[in-house]
Amino acid sequence: MRPSSSIVNDFTIELVGFPECELAAALLTELRPELDLVTAREFLRSAVAQGYQVLLQRGTAEAVLGMAGFRVFTTSRGRILMLEDLVVGRENRRSGLGNALVEALVGIAIDSGCQRIELDTGISNSNAQVFYSANEFRRTAYHYAREFDRPADIGHSPAPVHPREEIAPERSAD
């Protein structure tokens, strides 16, 4: 995938698996400063095992310029590509690389039978909001979160969820 309208034109974008996806760890720490490099690698390893996919954008000499992390799945609202992470290195921002990643994601979404791409941005992240609006995304929902007082367990898979009938309260026979 090589967009022609980008200001920076010497790059490739490819879908990568494990362990190659770990090359995106340094960029992920730019997007998520609360992660250190080791934790970012652990996250990528765990997330890829759970269906997270990584698009890697590379320049000359295989330097990693940008990355996008996403999942494709079906919801009650249809099949979607959920964009979880998109970042271009600080030194390459505003060069067209982010737009190229979005166009690559659009192609993947269409090829995967998705009705749309969905994503969340922080309420205070006005740069991301302007970027996504310029790339034809519309604000369509509010995202709510309920935090729990526990440390993030980034590198490990969660405990399995039990079927509802196993955790539903027992009913009396009356």
Image (cartoon, rainbow, N blue to C red):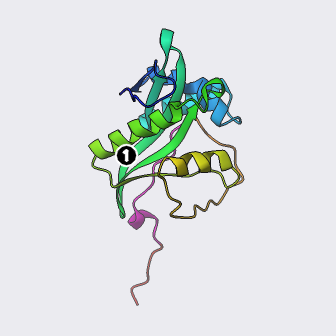
Answer with left or right where residue 15 lies relative to residue 148.
left
Total residue callouts: 1
**Image point 61% across, 46% down: which residue?**
128
Mark 1, residue position: 72
The residue drawn where x is 49% and y is 29% is: 45
Q: Amino acid at mark 1?
A: Val
91 displayed left or right of 171: right
In the rendering, at what x and y percent does residue 118 appear? 46, 53
Q: Quadrant of residue 155?
A: top right
- Which picture quadrant has residue 171? bottom left
Q: Is residue 1 visible?
A: yes
**Residue that protrudes farthest toward the top in the picture:** 61
Q: Quadrant of the C terminus?
A: bottom left
**What is the x, y in percent for residue 161?**
45, 54
Task: Let me know if residue 16 appears in the view.
Answer: no
Q: Under tag 1, what secondary structure?
A: strand
Q: Is residue 164 magenta?
A: yes
Residue 80 image position (x, y, % from top left): 37, 52
Quarter containing the N terminus: top left
Q: Residue at x 34, y 45 (%)?
A: 109
The span shown in magenta is 155-168
Closest to the observer, 83 or 162: 83
Q: Callout 1: 10 Å neighbours few (<14), some, many (20+)?
A: some
Q: Is residue 103 above or below residue 61?
A: below
- When the figure is inspected, residue 61 is found, relative to residue 6, above or below; the finding is above
Q: Residue at x 33, y 40 (%)?
A: 107
- Residue 25's x, y, as percent? 58, 26
Location of residue 13 with respect to 118 vertically, above or below: above
Return the residue nearer the eye: 145 or 153: 145
